[in-house]
Image (spheres, rainbow, N blue to C red):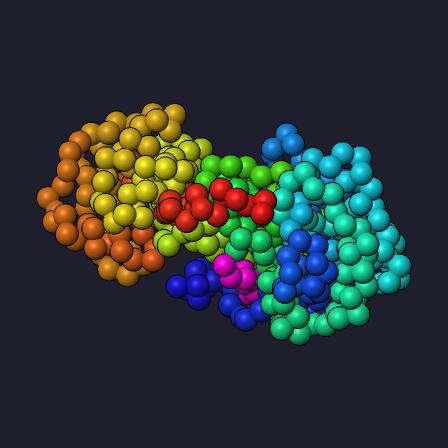
Amino acid sequence: MQESMAQGCGCKVISGGVTAAAGFQAASAAAGIKYQGRTDMAMIYSERPCTIAGTFTRNVVKAAPVLWDRDMVQSGKTAHAVVVNAGIANACTGRQGLDYCRETAEAAAEVLQIPADSVLVGSTGVIGYQLPMDRITAGVKMLAAALADSEEAGTAAAKAIMTTDTHKKECAVQFDLDGTTVTVGGMSKGSGMIHPNMCTMLAYVTTDAAVAQPLLQKAVSAIVDETFNMISVDGDTSTNDTLLVLANGASGAPAITEEGAAYEALKGALLFVCRTLAMEMAGDGEGATKLIESRVKGADTLENARILAKAVITSSLTKAAVFGGDANWGRVLCALGYSGAQFDPEHVDLYFSTSCGEPLLIFTNGSAADYREEDAAAILTASKVIITCDMHMGDAEATAWGCDLTYDYVKINADYRS
């Protein structure tokens, strides 16, 4: 499935993550920020300065690392490194939280011999706790000493930034640019407090392409609306959402300075990596057992297509029905109906399907279709459940991703701080 999707954007899927692109190194360390017996800090480093672009949470309450990174991106500065910790979010920590960002950057600058204002920072975990800066600075030194450009180092970094995630999330692709191979790789974390308009997610994407900052930002801003802003686990939008893309030009390919074929090729690769990471996060929602993919086609506008698709994957009743294997299609129609988008329910066709097999028509012409309840329920036992809504109004399409709602979601979040 991944390979066929990648071919659609002219890319080749390869193994790896943030170290797949030339010139990037990564490391992980066990600094004891909150967790014991596991790594909880990660670093990404490029000796060459990187053009940076990013998008951040739309929550009014923004964590200190979000403010720090947003200022760096908006200033047009280049970056050499990213330092990330898991366990404590450095959110709602006042002025001291921003001081901690500066101290982290200065610690990295000292050991890496780079400017402090070329260091991006990230945090994820419990809100309201102050960072133990003695452990953070000690962790930075361990990270710098462990930097490597191997695939294993990238994977270890992806594992180090997890909180309630059950597995690491990484992806990498390559494409040809004027005879030169260009690579895009990324890693992310996110499992709970996930909702459109970004989520409790950190995502870091690296590329060895050379690209002008305004073009890179334009691509990233467009891509996030099709990927990370189209996932939801629980309807909660985090304080720490961050997507950063770093481009160091180490491939030697011609610089991308204007829109055209080269720009579209890079944008397609970035889109594939971000979509893959977004789907991984949706499927790894806290307590989840199934990925739900909501496909809307035939909508009158792209905006309405996205609204309708999101409504399905954010419906708690639909999510609970999928968990229980109950093909209660009325909950899907109900979610479409309260989404805010206008449509004629008499003209909607609703299908259930899995990644393989023909779609099963569930609802048509304003009432239930002629199907066997056993067949519909069987589809809901799959690890990926696809719900397709054909609105028969136009040509606009959108896809959103979510997960089922299980008992374990409540268990995980009932005592998250402990």
The residue depicted at 59 percent of the width and 44 percent of the height is 417
Q: Is residue 272 left or right of residue 262?
A: left
Q: Position of residue 245 (x, y in %)?
A: 66, 53
Q: Position of residue 301 (x, y in %)?
A: 40, 33
User: Would you identify the image quadrant in which residue 181 lies?
Assistant: bottom right
Could you tell me which quadrant the N terminus lies in?
bottom left
Magenta: main secondary structure equals strand
Q: Is residue 192 visible?
A: yes
Q: Position of residue 352 (x, y in %)?
A: 25, 48
Q: Is residue 171 magenta?
A: yes
Is 353 drawn above or below residue 336 in the view shown? below
What is the total number of numbered labels drawn onto the structure image?
0
Q: Is residue 11 left or right of residue 131?
A: left
Q: Position of residue 62 (x, y in %)?
A: 67, 35
Q: Is residue 48 visible?
A: no
The residue depicted at 52 percent of the width and 55 percent of the height is 165
State the extent of the magenta-drawn residues as a range.
166-175
The residue depicted at 38 percent of the width and 25 percent of the height is 340
User: Would you identify the image quadrant in which residue 151 lies?
Assistant: bottom right
410, 264: nearer the viewer: 410
Q: Is residue 241 magenta?
A: no
The residue depicted at 69 percent of the width and 35 percent of the height is 92
